[in-house]
Amino acid sequence: MEHLMYDEGGLWVYVVVTVLLGGGGAFSTGRALARSWHDWPMVIVAMFGLTFGVRFIHFALFEETLLSLHFYLADFVTLCVIGLLGHRYTRAGQMTTQYRWLYERTGPLSWTEKPPVA
């Protein structure tokens, strides 16, 4: 149970390739899908291809396992979390900018309805 998230390349390879490179792509994908008003399940669908690309970089540059369900799922979950964060962050900005008379931002990832004007 020592290497649940990363392959024989080590933790630094996982952080650089999956979290930084793949995570940057996942965050951008989530933002792009939110800007085109797609719902969050579309982010999960888009992460399948991005995860395969990240696994290929692990394989081609660091001679790690290409077709391993375990590491594919670990990368997939990581990229989904980052992609969904990008989607939610952008959607919160959209809702409070486009509909400023209805919603106000309550945090970086959330918004709420404004109280009715008396």
Image (cartoon, helix red, strand yellow):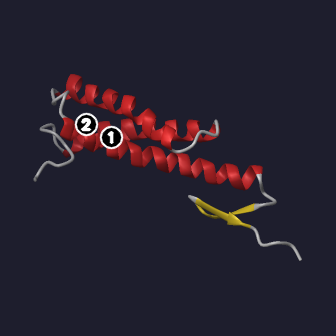
Tell me the residue at 68%/49% (across/down). Answer: 94
> Where does residue 45 sit, x and y in percent of width and height?
44, 35
Tell me the residue at 16%/30% (across/down). Answer: 64
The image shows residue 85, relative to residue 105, as above or below, that is above
Name the one closer to the observer, 28 or 43. 43
Residue 52 horizontal side relative to residue 87, left or right: left
> Do labels 1 and 2 touch, CB within 8 Å?
yes
Q: Quadrant of residue 33?
A: top right
The image shows residue 82, relative to residue 17, as above or below, that is below
Q: Residues within 10 Å of mark 1 (few under 14, many from 20)?
A: many
Task: Name the residue that disc number 2 marks.
Answer: 72
**Name of the residue lying farthest toward the right:** 118
**Name of the residue lying farthest toward the bottom:** 118
Say what amino acid the circle numbered 2 marks: Tyr
Tell me the residue at 15%/37% (across/down). Answer: 9
Residue 27 horizontal side relative to residue 6, left or right: right
Quadrant holding the C terminus: bottom right
**Dot label at residue 113:** none
- Secondary structure at badge 1 equals helix
Mark pair 1, 2: CA separation: 6 Å
> Where does residue 37 sit, x and y in percent of width and height?
64, 40
Say what amino acid the circle numbered 1 marks: Phe
Q: Residues within 10 Å of mark 2 (few under 14, many from 20)?
A: some
**Dot label at residue 76:** 1
Name the one closer to the observer, 118 or 29. 118
Tell me the residue at 37%/36% (across/down). Answer: 22
> Where does residue 18 sit, x and y in percent of width and height?
31, 39
Residue 84 horizontal side relative to residue 89, left or right: left
Q: Quadrant of residue 66?
A: top left
Name the one closer to the observer, 39 or 103. 39
- Secondary structure at badge 2 equals helix
